[in-house]
Amino acid sequence: MFACYTVSMIDIRSMKKGGGTPWTIDQVKSGFERFVVENGHYPNADEIDSYEYLPTSRSIQRSFGGLVELRKKFFPD
């Protein structure tokens, strides 16, 4: 069902309130992988918004084209 991922702590970033440097695709991927390892499923928008190691779902929409596009890129079937 889910592949086993090794999550690199180097790429892990926690969300901070307010502005800051933009999230990189590698940081977002590491956050997704960590979520899957911890929870056993891909995060939905509400889970992304409350998960410390991912940007908000709105940020993902603006910066990366949306949650569906990132899932396709990170976890191809």
Image (cartoon, helix red, strand yellow):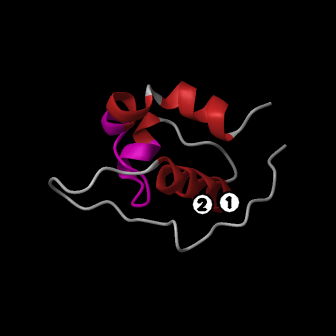
Magenta residues, as a range?
47-59
Task: Please tell me which residue is depicted at 53% across the width and 53% down the height of the picture.
Answer: 26
53 lies above or below 43: below
Secondary structure under the numbered disc 2 in the rendered image: helix
**Badge 2 density bin: few <14, some 14–19, many ≥20, Cα 10 Å:** many
68 lies above or below 55: above
Q: Residue 4 bears which disc, if any?
A: none
Q: Is residue 60 magenta?
A: no
Pick the front one: 26 or 53: 26
x, y percent for residue 53: 44, 60
Q: Amino acid at mark 2?
A: Arg
- Say left or right for 44 vs 63: right
Which quadrant, please, contains the N terminus? top right
Task: Please tell me which residue is depicted at 75% across the width and 33% down the height of the picture.
Answer: 76
Task: Please tell me which residue is depicted at 36% across the width and 45% down the height of the picture.
Answer: 49
Residue 45 in which image quadrant: top left
Residue 21 in which image quadrant: bottom left
Secondary structure under the numbered disc 1 in the rendered image: helix
x, y percent for residue 23: 37, 51
Q: Amino acid at mark 1?
A: Val
Task: Please tell me which residue is depicted at 68% across the width and 60% down the height of the picture.
Answer: 37
Q: Residue furthest bottom?
A: 9
- Say left or right for 64 vs 35: left
Which residue matches tag 2? Answer: 34
**Badge 1 density bin: few <14, some 14–19, many ≥20, Cα 10 Å:** some
- Marks 2 and 1, Cα distance to the nearest angstrom? 5 Å
Which residue matches tag 1? Answer: 37
x, y percent for residue 33: 63, 55
Q: Do the residues bearing badges 2 and 1 touch, measured as CB atoms within 8 Å?
A: yes
Which quadrant, please, contains the C terminus? top right
